[in-house]
Amino acid sequence: MNRYLVQRLGFALLTGVSLVVVIPVVLVVAVILLKGFEAMSWVFISSMPHDGMKAGGIFPAIVGTVLLTFGTALVSIPIGVGGTIYLAEYARDTWLTRCIRLAIVNLAGIPSIVYGLFGLGLFVLFLKMGTSIVAGSLTLAIMTLPVIISTAEEALRAVPMEFRTVSASLGGTRWQGIRNIILPQAFPGIITGILLGLLRAAGETAPILFTVAAFYLPRLPQSPFDQTMSLPYHLFVVSTQVPGMPEEMQYGTALVLLALVLSMNVAATVVRSYFRRRRQW
Amino acid sequence: MNSREDLRTRWLSWTELAIEALIRVLGFSTVGFVLLIFLFLLKEGVPVFFEVPLGNLFGTRWYPTFGYFGTTPLILGSAVVTVVAVVIALPLGVATAVFVREVAPSWAREILKPTIETLAGIPSVVLGFFGMTIIAPMVHQYLGAPTGLTVFTGALILAYMALPTIISVAEDALDAVPKSYRDAALAMGATQWQTIWRVVVPAARSGIAVAVMLGMGRAIGETMTVMMVTGNAARIPLSLDSLFKPVRTMTATIAAEMGEVAQGSVHYHALFGLGIILFVLTFLINLLAARSIFKKQRRGGLR
């Protein structure tokens, strides 16, 4: 067979496979958008569930997910950014540094349900926080660390070496250089990393199953040590645990969750590309 | 230098020392977290090895309420789902990575990259929900399975969940192949296609292997999707037709049962024991994958 014909067939095959990858993604988003849209109403978003979650809204689940994401951010941003600064600016290539890198790779690989077990063992039972927003946020925060660190480190490393040498040559100390030059320059990359980490936290179910999630709690949480409903767990509950659940409750919940997570995804992409265009180096 | 300025610099250097110490601690915190996770899994999981005889633990029946803690069907369940998922995802992922890096016109890349990022962002519970409501009925109807909640359904969705990881790591691997390899092949009269399949992809094979392993790690640890679409029947999935029968994985077992067990009971310890197995498995997979990350990249003529 003519090798140019082979090439044409090969390229056609690759195009076909790429379509096989892309089309289902579009379908998933489209189906949930269309079916979920029918359920959308002000009542659905802003009111308490009632009649065993078969009617009413998902307001406490939305609030719960927002609170959990916020709590996660509170813990994971300082640890993540600090860890990133250490790795990118201070750490030399020693076996200890390699241990840190290995730890990050492993944190990224640990199954989400194992984070759930860990959160149950350490925060809920050992530290006696009970199933609470604090316990859930701490669990999720540790899970998001590798995402934040790996994305933010890339951003810090992308800042040219000259920026550091110039800062030092003007008499700046290492920390002054980091605070005044490196961090502002790497800021968009750090924000992207934080958004990517938090969107993972917002969408995860397994780590919060035993650490915070309430099956049915038609009120808002009263304190950080309260349980709360949350969107991902609520979707799991309404789609598997309650027989006879109306379809629009399920698709509506799926749509709100998907919209929340994907908007964070879009925000991360926009921040990255906007600042990349404005960058002076 | 007057004394006030002197004081100021000294104060500055103290705060700097404090800040740098803090940053150092934060840098090492990740190691602490990994150790802490392992420690607590061991603390809650190891007792099961003393409470249940080994023959029972590695038996074939998982009926915790009757004292049977045979983990074999669960381990095999995880293995089968993961292997089938990787078998589906590997060709799709590598072909897409090759398409994006080597063949696609820039407009197609502009569509593909964000779509794959979107896929990476979709929460697993949403994909599980989609699988339950849309894909499972199709598997039931068109593939003649007695129920739509099967190994195949779960593996199909897991494959898509592993794709973003596989594609991005494979892309990096293709990207790392020196341009001189391509130039040499093209200069010898090879077509672009021949260059890709006979030079570029083979040169990137170790990176592609890493991609597959990381994808495998993702698939084996996935919980919600698997719990929602694989039917959760703890049976040994070794016959050929078990591809279209329900199965139960380790992750789904933990997620489904931990909510109902008494703290400190044998069952509770057994579920943490499954957690230990999962932790060790993913640790090994990542260690293997990371080995090549840490290896100094040798390129050019030295091979």
Image (tube, coloured by chain):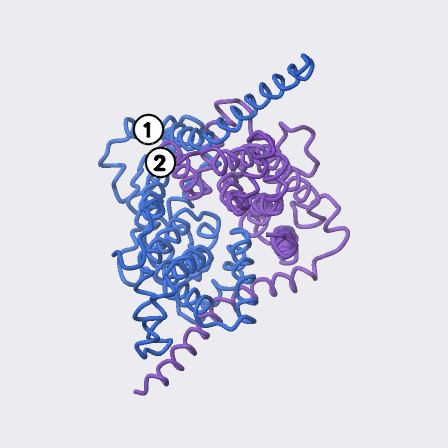
Chain colours: A purple, B blue
**Three-letter residue code for mark 1:** Val
**Three-letter residue code for mark 2:** Ile
The residue tagged with tag 1: helix, strand or loop? loop
Quarter-wise, where is residue B158 in the image? Answer: bottom left
Farthest bottom residue? A2
- Please report whichever mark, 2 or 1, sits nearer to the chain's N-terminal start: 1
Q: Which mark is residue B46?
A: 1
Farthest left residue? B55
Q: Do tag 2 and tag 1 residues touch (Cβ < 8 Å)?
A: yes
The image position of residue B221, as x and y in percent, is: 41, 46
Quarter-wise, where is residue A183 in the image? Answer: top right
Q: Read off the chain for label 2.
A: B
Q: Read off the chain for label 1.
A: B
Pick the residue in front: A124 or A164.
Answer: A164
- Examine the rendered structure and indicate whether residue B106 appears above or below residue A41: below
Q: Which residue is mark 2?
A: B276
Farthest front residue? B1
- Examine the rendered structure and indicate whether residue B172 appears above or below residue B67: below
Quarter-wise, where is residue B171 in the image? Answer: bottom left
The image position of residue A255, as x and y in percent, is: 64, 56
Pick the residue in front: A183 or B103.
Answer: A183
The image position of residue A197, as x and y in percent, is: 55, 44
- Examine the rendered structure and indicate whether residue B50 appears above or below residue A53: above
- Residue at the (68%, 17%) spot, across then down: B5
- Residue at the (29%, 51%) spot, across then down: B236
Q: Would you call the spot at circle 1 few (<14 residues within 10 Å), some (14-19), or many (20 or more)?
A: some
Viewer can see residue A51: yes
